[in-house]
Image (tube, rainbow, N blue to C red):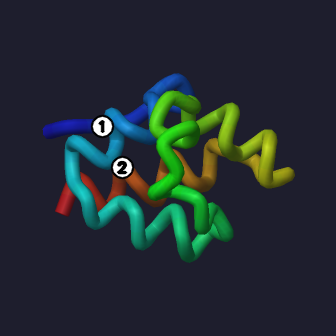
Amino acid sequence: MAQVTKDTLIGEALAMNMDIAEILMKAGMHCVGCPASQGESIEEACMVHGMECEPLVKEINEFLAK
């Protein structure tokens, strides 16, 4: 089963499952299609958006576990 961590790059997460984009967008990360965001880690993206990354990592991993 694939899982992400706070260090997983956005591009890597989307390569695991493109439907993760919906989770990121719901969290307010509407720039998931931006080429620069592909090289950011989940933690870096959360910092830019002023949010904690652990709840988002948990949500993505729960989605991937289904």
Q: Which mark is residue 61?
A: 2
Nearer-the-camera pick, 15 or 27? 15
Query: Residue drawn at (62%, 68%), measured in percent from left and top?
Result: 27
Cα distance between the residues tagged 1 and 2: 5 Å
Name the quarter where the C terminus is drawn: bottom left
Residue of label 1: 3
Q: Is residue 1 above or below residue 29?
A: above
Query: Residue drawn at (46%, 30%), measured in percent from left and top?
Result: 9
Badge 2 density bin: few <14, some 14–19, many ≥20, Cα 10 Å: some
Nearer-the-camera pick, 40 or 2? 40
Mark 2: which secondary structure?
A: helix
**Total label count?**
2
* Amino acid carrying mark 1 in the image: Gln
Badge 1 density bin: few <14, some 14–19, many ≥20, Cα 10 Å: some
Q: Are marks 1 and 2 in contact (CB under 8 Å)?
A: yes
* Amino acid carrying mark 2 in the image: Asn
Measured from the top left, where is residue 62 in percent x and y?
A: 34, 57
Q: Which mark is residue 29?
A: none
Q: Is residue 32 above or below residue 54?
A: below
